[in-house]
Amino acid sequence: MNISMGAKNKKRVVLPNRPDPPTVEQILEDINRAFPNDPVFSVLDGNQDANRGSPDNEVETKYLQSRRYLETNERLQEIKGELVQRREELREAGKQLEIRVAEVKGRAL
């Protein structure tokens, strides 16, 4: 019986909501404000040294970076949808669990 009393004393921790992800416009603005030597560009472009000096290569590099960004953004949107669905499934499971616990408690009394 002491076990159930300990469970009653636990308080539910409420976590703050996560901020909304940045919009595409905000991301593009951030990218446009970045300096060309920003580390993120060197990470995205493994052969940056080979592309220096030629305007055509710079355009190609920017194009490839943009394509990678768009592909990554699309994948993140897909994952976001999956996570929203899973969150709703977990909430529903939590509600069902609370109902079942209440039923068990009702039978025990």
Image (spheres, grey):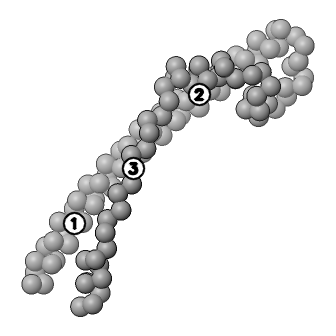
Res 80 → quadrant: top left
The image shows residue 76, relative to residue 83, as above or below, that is above
Cβ–Cβ below 8 Å for labels 1 and 2? Answer: no
Which of discs 3 and 1 lies nearer the camera? The answer is: 3
Locate residue 7 relative to residue 46 in the image: left or right. left
Residue 86 shows in the view: no
On the image, numbered disc 2 is attached to which residue? 71
Count of numbered badges drawn on the protein: 3
The image shows residue 95, relative to residue 17, as above or below, that is below
Residue most extreme to the top: 55
Q: Residue at x 29, y 54 (%)?
A: 91
Near-viewer residue (2 or 70):
2
- The circle on residue 47 is none
Residue at mark 1 to residue at mark 2: CA–CA distance: 41 Å
Residue most extreme to the bottom: 1
Residue 107 shows in the view: yes
Label 3 vs 1, first from the N-terminus? 3
Judging from the image, what secondary structure is the residue with disc 1 in?
helix
Residue at mark 3 to residue at mark 1: CA–CA distance: 22 Å
Question: Can you give x and y, in whole percent of width and height, for residue 84 in the image?
Answer: 38, 43
The image shows residue 109, relative to residue 20, as above or below, that is below
On the image, numbered disc 1 is attached to which residue? 98
Amino acid at dot 2: Glu
Judging from the image, what secondary structure is the residue with disc 2 in?
helix
Label 1 vs 2, first from the N-terminus? 2
Res 63 → quadrant: top right
On the image, numbered disc 3 is attached to which residue? 16
Residue at mark 2 to residue at mark 3: CA–CA distance: 30 Å
**Which quadrant of the rendered structure holds the N terminus?**
bottom left
